[in-house]
Each structure stands twice: as structure tokens, then as C-alpha cells.
Image: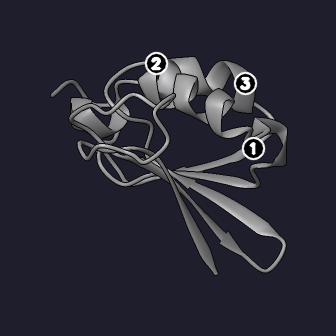
Amino acid sequence: MKIITFLDNCESENRSLIEKFGLSFCLEVSSSKILFDFGPDATALYNTKHLGIPLNRIDFAIGIHGHFDHAGGFPDFWERLSHTCFIAGKGWFNEK
């Protein structure tokens, strides 16, 4: 199992990544890649490009909860993940 952080509020050793309040990470289990959350805006997507993560390899995308710091970047990701199974709890798309 491997966790790849796309975005959080901690400075990365990789200076090409942007840190920001929010969360987005990928869990690799066996041959599956599961994206958890999308960060507050397009910053997490920007970081995936600098990490060399091909989004067409993501199998599942999970929205943990719909607060802006976890869900704000969803539209930017979804344009590139429409092939992916998206899982979210009831009310995830409700206005917050």
C-alpha cells in the first residue's frame, strides 16, 4: 500500500508542489488507485501534474465530505476523471 499526497497544508520536499489548506491524496492498493478528495481549488490537480501522476490511471474517486477544502477542486478533476467511478455520501453536493 502506498499513499501519495497531492495536496495538504504541509511544505513538501518537492519544491515544485504548492501547499495549501485542504486535502487530496491517492491510495495505491495492489493495482488499484483511489483518489480521496480534491482540495479547495485546482491546486491539487496542478500538483498531480508535477508529481507525474496520470489521472487516467485512477480507478475510483471518493469525496469524503463536501466542505470547500476537500471538494472545491472537484470540477477541475472531474473534467479529467469522467471515466472513473465516483463515490460520495448523501449530501456531498449540497451547498455548504
Of the numbered discs 3 and 2, the one sitting upstream in the chain is 2
Above-or-below relation of 67 to 95:
below
User: How many angstroms separate mark 3 from mark 2 (CA)?
Assistant: 12 Å
User: How many angstroms separate mark 2 from mark 1 (CA)?
Assistant: 18 Å
Secondary element at tag 1: loop
Q: Nearer the viewer, mark 3 or mark 1?
A: 3
Crowd around label 2: few <14 · some 14–19 · many ≥20 (10 Å): some
Q: Residue at x 76, y 55 (%)?
A: 59
Q: Nearer the viewer, mark 2 or mark 1?
A: 2
Q: Nearer the viewer, mark 3 or mark 2?
A: 2
Q: Residue at x 46, y 18 (%)?
A: 42
Q: Specify the quadrant that holds the C terminus.
A: top left
Residue contact at pointers 3 and 1, CB within 8 angstroms: no
Across and down, in percent, residue 21 comes to 21, 35
Secondary element at tag 3: helix
Find disc 1 in the rendering and name its residue. 84
Find disc 3 in the rendering and name its residue. 80
Above-or-below relation of 36 to 2:
above
Q: Amino acid at mark 3?
A: Arg
Residue contact at pointers 3 and 2, CB within 8 angstroms: no
Q: Specify the quadrant that holds the N terminus.
A: bottom right
The reply, left or right, for residue 46 in relation to residue 22 is right
Secondary element at tag 2: loop
Find disc 2 in the rendering and name its residue. 42
Of the numbered discs 2 and 1, the one sitting upstream in the chain is 2
Residue lying farthest left? 96
Residue contact at pointers 2 and 1, CB within 8 angstroms: no
Q: Amino acid at mark 2?
A: Ala
Across and down, in percent, residue 65 comes to 29, 49
User: How many angstroms separate mark 3 from mark 1 (CA)?
Assistant: 9 Å
Q: Residue at x 75, y 37 (%)?
A: 55
Crowd around label 1: few <14 · some 14–19 · many ≥20 (10 Å): some
